[in-house]
Amino acid sequence: MPFFASNRRGAAGSGFGHSTLPTTGKPKPLRKPSGSRRRNLFTPSPTFFSIAIFLSLLLFLAVFLRYGFPSHLSSSPKSSSWQNSRLLRRPKPKPYGAGAGTGGATRTGGDISAASVDITTKDLYDRIEFRDIDGGAWKQGWKVEYEGGEWNEEKLKVFVVPHSHNDPGWKQTVEEYYIHQSRHILDTIVESLSRDARRKFIWEEMSYLERWWRDASELKRASFSNLVKNGQLEIVGGGWVMNDEANSHYFAIIEQMMEGNIWLNDTIGVVPQNSWSIDPFGYSATMAYLLRRMGFRNMLIQRTHYEVKKELASQKNLEYIWRQSWDVDETTDIFVHMMPFYSYDIPHTCGPEPAICCQFDFARMRGFGYEYCPWRTDPVETNLNNVQDRASKLLDQYKKKSTLYRTNTLLVPLGDDFRYVSIDEAEAQFRNYQMIFDHINNNPTLMAEIKFGTLEDYFRTLRNEAERKNYSRPGEVGSGELGGFPSLSGDFFTYADRNHDYFSGYFVSRPFFKAVDRILEQTLRASEMMAAFVLGYCQKYQCSKLPISFTYKLTAARRNLALFQHHDGITGTAKNHVVEDYGNRMHTSLQDLQIFLSRAVEVLLGDISDKRDPTLLLKFEPEQIRSKYDVQPVHRVLDLHEEQSHSVVFFNPLEQLRDEVVMIVTSVPDISIINSSGSCVPSQISPEWNPSTKDKAFTGNHRLYWRASVPPMGLETYYVAHGFKGCGKAVPAELKMSSGLYSLPCPSPYVCSKLEGNETKIRNAHHTLVFDVIHGLLRRIVHKNGEKTVLGEEIGMYSSSGSGAYLFKPTSEARPIVEEGGQLLISEGPLVREACSIPKTTWSKTPVAHCTRIYNEENIFQELLIEKEYHVDMGRDEFNNRELIVRFKTDIDSKRVFYSDLNGFQMSRRETYDKIPLQGNYYPMPSLAFIQNLLGRRFSVHSRQSLGVASLKNGWLEIMLDRRLVNDDGRGLGQGVMDNRPMNVLFHLLLESNVSVSPSASTFPVLRPSILSHAVGARLEYPILAFVTRKEEAMPSKPALKSFAPLSSSLPCDLHVVSLKVPHPTKFPQERLAEPRFAIIFQRKGWDSSYCRRGELQCSLVADEPVNLYYMFKDLSVQNVVATSLNLLRDDAEILGYGKQLRGIAHEGNVLLSPMEIQAFKLELQWPT
C-alpha cells in the first residue's frame, strides 16, 4: 500500500478524488473564456463601486497597522505521526521577492515565474572559492568535533541501512553480473533477513530483481514478498536501473522508472516512495521533478562536487527541499538527503574519518576476498572483551557525522558495490553490528539509539522529529512540504570527486551509442503510439492480434532502452564487451520495432475488417536500415524501372501537422512525386555525397527532396514514380566545386562549375551564409534585413594524457586542425542548398567532414534554421588521446554565460568561471544550448544526441563531438575509450532576436527556449519516419487516398504528447471492465514570450485554445479518464504534489496544464459502435 495513502496535505486536496475527469458521457465542448460569459445578476452603479473600494482600503489599513507585512511561517507540529498526518501545511504563494532566492515576477504567454528559494546552485558556485584545502582525516572537509551535550534533550537516533549497489553492466554485462553475483546477493538477502526480524535491507535495481524472480522458487518469492511487506526489505527507487542524469532524455527516464515500478507493483504489490541514487555522476533537477510527479516525497543523492558538499555541510544544509526553478507554488518540492563524504562505501559513510570507519566493514576481515583497509588497521571480530571500545569508536563517528545535519536523526549506509554476496559475509556484518548496537542501546548515558533500518524508517523518523521541533532559521523561505529545512533550486553539474578531476568526459564518451539511444527512444515512442491506435481501431477485429502478439518484443524494447539509461550505459563508461552487449540489445529491439511499425502502417492504411493474419503482412519496410549494432543506418536505395513506382508512407510522431521537406535516395534521377490525391509535387535531386573518401566524392545515387504534409500522429502516402508522363521530373541541383573536386567527373545529370574566389555563399529568403572556400568553414550570416552575424566555425582538437571514460583533463586549450586546401562542394536547388566540405588536416585521413544545409521552401520551420551535419571518424590510432570539438565563434556579447538543457526538459544557466579549470566549465548538453546578449540576440544549437558543451570565451559555444583515449582515468573501469565508430552528428542552428527588452539576469536566472526553438528541437528529436513498399508497382492512373489522421486537429504548439501507450498489451482483451487500458502523457512547454515568432507553424497555444481530451481523437471515443502519476500507479493529487491545477485539468476534460508541467492520464479508447 502506498506509504502516503493517508498523508494528504491540507483541505484543498481532499476533494481530488471527486474532481477527476468525468467517467461517463461527454461534456459539451469548452468555449474560450470571454467577457460575455460573466454572470450579470445586477449592474452596480459607480457610487456603489466607490464605496466598496473605500471600505476595502480602510480594512486593509487596519490589518496592516495591526499585523504589519506578512512573514514566512515556519512549520509547526501537526501530529506525532508523519505517516498518518493529514494536517501538513500546504505550500503557499510567497510574496514578491520573498526569501534569499530570486523574486517571483511573472511574464506572459508560455513564460513562467522564478521560484523563491534559500539556495541556488549558482549562488553556491559564486560563493565557493574552489581552493581544495586539505581538511585532515576528512580530507575534503575539516576536523569535525562536538561538545557532548548536543543530545541531552533529544537522543541521537541512528539508522544503519544495509545495501548492495548492483550495476546492470559495467565491467561485466548485466547477465554476467547476475550469474556471478547478483542472484547470490538476492538469495542472501532473503535468507539472512529471515533469520532475524531486526535486520533490514534496501534494493534498487528492478532489472536484477525481475531476472532473479524468473529463476526463484515459489518459496523464495513468497519470502521476498513477505520481507517487503513487513518492512524489513524496502525497494527504493524501483526503476529498471539507477539512471544517469546527465545524458538521459526525460522520456527515457520516465520509461525506465515506469517499467520498473509497474513490474514491481504487478509482481509484489508495492510502489516505491523513496529514491536512492548513490552512483550517477552529478544530479539533475529534472529527476527531482519526475520523482515528485511519480509520488516520491524523499530522495537520497551522493556524487556532488566535493566543494559543494563542504559548503552545504558547513551550514547544515545537506538536507534540503529541492524546488524547481519555476515553481512559485511549491508543488514540486521534494525532500533530499545528500551524503556528505567522498564515496558510498563503508569507509566513507559512518563518519568523517575513513580510517576508523573502515574498521567497521566486517566483510574486509580475512576470508571474504575484499581488499583490506588501505589505512592499515583492519576490522576485527566484535566480542565481549572489545565491544565497549568498538562501540565507543563507532558512536564517536556517528556523532561527528550528525553535527553536519540539523536533526538528531542520522542515516548511515552500510554497503558497497556487489556486497552481501554470501551468507557468511552478511552474517559477519549483521552479527558484529548487532552486538555493538545492543551495547549502545543498553547504556542510556550514551544518549543514542541505533538499529538497522530502511530509507523509509529514516525519513519517517526524521519527518516526525522535524514536525515536533522547529529547525527553521530566521528569514528562511523553507517549504510547506516539510518545515525546518532550506529550499534549493538548480542542478549539480559538473561533478568533481577530488582535486581537478571533473566528470565531464562522460558527457561525450561513446557518442555513437548515445545517438543509437535516441533512435531507439523515438522508435519505441512511435511503436507505442501505433500499437495504441491499432488496438483502439481494431478491438473487435483480427488486426488487434498484431500488437498483442508483439507484446513480448515490445516489452523487451522498453527494457533494453531502460537498461541503457544505467549510469554506466548511456554514459559510455563500461568495458568494451559490455558496450557491445548494450549495442546488440538496442539493435535487436530496433529491428523488432521497425518490423512492427511496417505492419502497423499497413493495418492503419488498409481495411481494419480484413481477416488476414496481421503478423504476416509484408508490403512495407523501413526506409532506413541498419545492418549491425555498430554501424550507422543507411537509406534504402529505390531502384525504379520505367513506368514503375514505389509508395512512400510517412509517419508523423508529433501532435502538430508536419509540413516540411523530406528526403529519400534513388538510383535514377528522372523521378516524379505524386501525392495521395493524385496531384504532382515539385521535387529536387542532388548527388549523394560520400564524405569518407576524397577520390570518390559521389556514390552515384541521388537524394530526392520534396515538400510533404503529414497529419499529426498520422500517416500520409506519396508515390515515387519513374517515367511518369503526367508530372514534371525532379529538378537537378547545380553544383560548384573547389579545384580538388572539379578535377573529378561531373555526375550526371548535373551541371558543374568551378568555385572561384576566397568566399562563396548559399542563401534562402531568410539568410545568406558566407563560407571561407580555402578552409571550407562557415564565417558569417547576412540576414534578410541586411544585418550581419559573425558565426565563425572552427574545428579543433584537445590533447590529453589524463582523460578517460569519465574524466576530461586536457593538457591545454583546443587547437584548430583545419588547414588550407580542403575540398568544398556547393549544391543549389529549388528546395535545398548546401555546402559540403572535406577539410585538409595534418592527418592523411581527416577525422571529420561536414555539410551545412538550408531550405528554400516558404512557410515551413526549416527555412528559419541552419542544418549542420558532421561525419566523424576517430577510429585510428593517430587520434589517440585526442578529443574533437566544433566551436562557433559569434559576435554575441554573452559575458561567458550560456544555457544548456537538462534531459531535454528544462534549461539551466551556466557561467564560465576562471577559478574552475577548463574541464569543470564543460556541461552536459542532451539536446540544446544557447548564448544570448542583453538585447536578446540569441544563438541556439539543437543536437540530435547528447554531447558536452562549454562557452570558454565571450560569444563562443563549443561542443565536443568525440574522444579517443588510451588510458584509464583511475575510476575503476580499467581501460580507455578506443572503440570509436564512424557516425554523423546533426545540429540545427537557430539565430533569433527578441521583440521586447530582455530581462536582466538577476531577475530571471534561467531563460527559456522560444516557441520556435521548441518546434525545431521536437522535429529533430522526433523526425518523420518513412516506410517504402518492398516491391515496385505500376503507377495507378488515379491513386487511392491513403492517409490516416487520428486527431481531430493539431494540438497547440506548446503542448507535447510525451507518450501514448497501452501499458499492458497482453492483458488488453481481459481488462476492459477493470481500469482504463490506455495511457497518455502531456507536457506543456515553458517558453520565452519575448520571442513571439512561431516559425510559420500556424499553430495555436494552450492559453488560446484548451484541449479537450474527449474531443482530441477524430474517430475514437474517449471514456473513463483518470489523472494519474507519471509511473501510472498513483491517482491522488496530493501525493503527486499537484494542487489546484489538477482540478482545472479535471474540469470537463480540458487539459489546462501550467507551463513546464507533465501530466499523465489513464483512459479508455473505443471505436464507436
Image: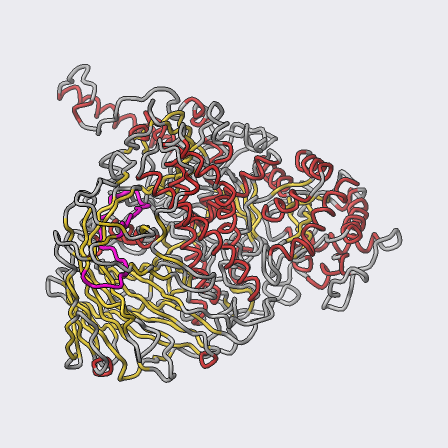
Work out which quarter of the rendered image holds the C terminus and state it.
top left
- Asked if the stretch drawn in magenta spans residue 234, the answer is no
Seen in the image, is 13 located left or right of residue 204?
Answer: left
Which residue is pictured at 15% across the width and 59% down the height? 729
Query: Residue 770 lies in what quarter of the image?
Result: bottom left
| Main SS category, magenta section | strand
Question: Residue shown at 58%/39% (left/top)?
Answer: 264
Residue 359 shown left or right of residue 552 in the figure: right
The colour mode here is secondary structure
Please give left or right for residue 820 compared with residue 982 in the image: left
Q: Image quadrant for the N terminus?
A: top right
x, y percent for residue 754: 16, 79
Q: Is residue 675 left or right of residue 425?
A: left
Work out which residue is located at the far left of the displayed protein and give it.
785
Q: Residue at x 57, y 35 (%)?
A: 266
- Bounds of the magenta span? 646-670
Q: How many marks?
A: 0
Relative depth, front residue between 573 and 538: 538
**Picture quadrant of residue 189:** top right
Determine the residue positioned at 48% across, 77% down: 881
- Whether residue 1008 is visible to the viewer of this picture, yes or no, is no
Query: Closer to the camera, 509 or 74?
Result: 509
Q: Nearer the viewer, residue 625 or 910?
A: 625
Q: Residue furthest top?
A: 41
